[in-house]
Image (spheres, rainbow, N blue to C red):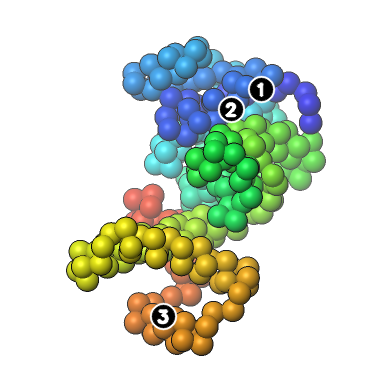
Amino acid sequence: MTEQLTIAVIGAGGKMGMRISNNLQRTAHAVRYAETSPAGRDRVTDAGREVVDSAEAVKGAQVIVLAVPDLALGPVTEELVPLAEPGAIVLTLDPAAAYAGLLTTRDDVIMGVAHPCHPSVFLERTSKEEWADTFGGIAAPQDAVAAIESDDPAQKSILETVIRAIYAPVIDVHWVTVKQLAQLEPTLVETVACMIGRLLNEALEEAVHTMGVPEPAARAMLLGHTQVALANGLRGDNPFSDACLIAMDYGQETIIKEDWKKIFSDDELDKNLARMLHLESIQR
């Protein structure tokens, strides 16, 4: 899709707001940047962009990108969705609030969610800029996962155009339901993958400070073996040795609860999101 779109970015001065605004500024789309905090407004203007009020930004916008924290999405959508043009797409960047039913909606306004996958650990990087871009949205290509509450191919095309712009460079956009996106983020990637990343760092600290291993040796061993573990475990590049398999079983028996896969159930997803959103429970 090549047509110029009118896009509103709400929360344009926040961390994610600045990231996606930097990318949108490089496109031909007509973009309006809204930010309420004084520090955020300064960041927007320092980047050479004009700050407008949220109501002004939303007026006539085909896509409204809500780059605000999950906890703010309820009141922000309550204020802005009634002002949206019929047929506009309201895009949130995380599925939690949408899945929990915290967003104000309208029958003639389409709700969408999109989240970046971040550059793959197996990405073939060809420049220093790509190696430095571990988060994505600057130089290293990444995928994105999205959901849209519409069966209209034109609306889906518009949303994909915006997703490819805000998370550029994008390889593929994968379409799922809002619930499936919530099962991926947080359950698969935050509850499991990010937790394991933190565990690896804690294990490194134990090797250095408790076992007394020199830090450079421990770090070199861990980083190299982490790549091997991911390549073997996720891609099957090389089989683990028999001794390694025994050690892996010991680690799983010692560290992981036997019922850990319950986190993929609907009840546990609701519990997890309720904690993240500071709710007593998820109500539907």
Q: Quadrant of residue 254?
A: bottom left
Q: Nearer the viewer, residue 196 or 71?
A: 196
Secondary structure state at the residue bearing disc 1: loop
The crowd level at tag 3 (other Cα within 10 Å; few <14, some 14-19, many 20+) is few
Q: Identify whether 105 is placed above or below 267.
A: above
Q: Quadrant of residue 92?
A: top right
Question: Which quadrant: the N terminus?
Answer: top right
Amino acid on which disc 1 is placed = Thr
Residue at the image point whose x is 63% and y is 70% from the top: 237
- CA gap, disc 3 to disc 1? 48 Å
Q: Is residue 147 visible?
A: no
Mark 3 sits on what residue?
252
Q: Is residue 72 visible?
A: yes
- Residue 150, position in %: x, y? 71, 43
Q: Is residue 29 left or right of residue 247?
A: right
- Residue 14, position in %: x, y? 42, 29
Lower position in the chain sequence, tag 3 or tag 1: 1
Residue at the image point whose x is 52% and y is 19% from the top: 33
Residue at the image point whose x is 51% and y is 55% from the top: 185
For the residues bearing labels 2 and 1, Cβ distance under 8 angstroms: yes
The crowd level at tag 1 (other Cα within 10 Å; few <14, some 14-19, many 20+) is few
Q: Quadrant of residue 122?
A: bottom right
Residue 27's label in the rendered image is 1
Mark 2 sits on what residue?
23
Q: Identify whether 273 is placed above or below 41.
A: below
Amino acid on which disc 2 is placed = Asn
Amino acid on which disc 3 is placed = Gln
Q: Is residue 265 left or right of residue 112?
A: left
Lower position in the chain sequence, tag 3 or tag 2: 2
Q: Nearer the viewer, residue 106 or 242?
A: 242
